[in-house]
Image: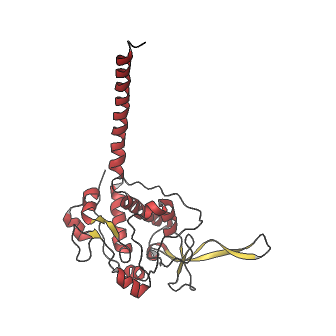
Amino acid sequence: MKRTIVKGRVLVSSALLALAAAGAVIAAGDVDLDHAQTDVSNIAALQRGAKLFVNYCQGCHGSQYMRYSRLGEDLGLTEEQIEENLIFNDAKVGDVILSAMDGADQQVWLGAQAPDLSVVARSRGVDWLYTYLRQFYIDPSRPIGWNNKAYPNANMPNVFWEMQGVRKAVYETHEKEDGAEEKVLVGFEQVTEGTMTEEEFDQTMLDLVSYLEYLGEPAKLQRESLGIWVLLYLALFTFVAYLLKKEFWKDVK
C-alpha cells in the first residue's frame, strides 16, 4: 500500500475557533446516523486523519493514551517526519499527545475542560462521529455562533467551516399529537461555499473518523490478524485431541 507523508501546518483561524469551544463534544441523543465506511488498514487515510487532528482538534482536545512515537510505528513515519508534520509545540516524539491548551486554563477561560478523544470512537461509535462532524450550522442565538443537528447546543464551533462553507438551518412546521405546532430542522441551506465540495468534505471527515477509530484501539489490526492464527490453532488442537481421545478409548467397552 502506498504511504503518503503527512504535510500540514497549524491553521491559526481554525485553532482560535477550537480554543473557543467549551464543554464536551460527546452527548447522548437520538439522531439518524450516516454510515461511516472507515478502514483503519488504510495508512494514507490515517495519516491524513492525523494531520487533521493536530491542526484542527488538538487546540482543545488531546489523546493522552497515544504517543507520537506510536504514530510513527503504525503510520510509517520517521521521527523527523513526526517532528516536522505533527508536533507544533515543545513536545518530544516519545511524549503523549496532549491538548495545546492546559486543562486548568480551559476551566478558567472556557468554563469547562474539553474531553480527551483517545477513546471517543469506542464510546460514541464511528457513525455518530461521522454524522456529528458534518452537521454544523450557524446559529446567532448561541454564544459561539454555531449549533449542531446531531448534538443540539453543543459547546463546540465548526472548526471545519472553511472547508465545508457556512450553512444555515432549514425548518418546517409540524403538528404534534396534541395539536401544538413545532419547528423541525429538516436540512441546511448553503450560505457561503467552502474550499471543498460536499463529497470531498465527507471524505475528509471520514479520514478524521478513521484516525479516531485507530486511536481507540491501535492494536486492532494486529489483534484481528493474530485472531485468525489463534482460531486455526484451536481448530488443529481440537482435531488432534479428538484423534487422541479415539486412540485412548478405543479398547474401552
Residue at image point 55% right, 72% down = 151
Q: How is the image coloured?
A: secondary structure
Residue furthest to the front = 253
Q: Position of residue 189 (x, y in %)?
A: 59, 74
- Quadrant (top left/top right/bottom left/bottom right) for the C terminus: top left
**Residue 157 screen position, x and y as percent:** 47, 79
Q: Is residue 78 left or right of residue 20?
A: left
Side of 60 where 190 appears, left or right: right
Q: Residue furthest left?
A: 80
The x and y percentages for residue 242 are 38, 24
Name the one closer to the observer, 197 or 40. Answer: 40
Question: With 173 as the anchor, is 193 left or right in this view?
Answer: left
The picture quadrant where one finds residue 142 is bottom right
Q: Is residue 3 left or right of residue 107?
A: left
Q: Residue at x 63, y 75 (%)?
A: 170
The answer to whether residue 231 is above or below residue 190 is above
Q: Position of residue 86 (x, y in %)?
A: 28, 69
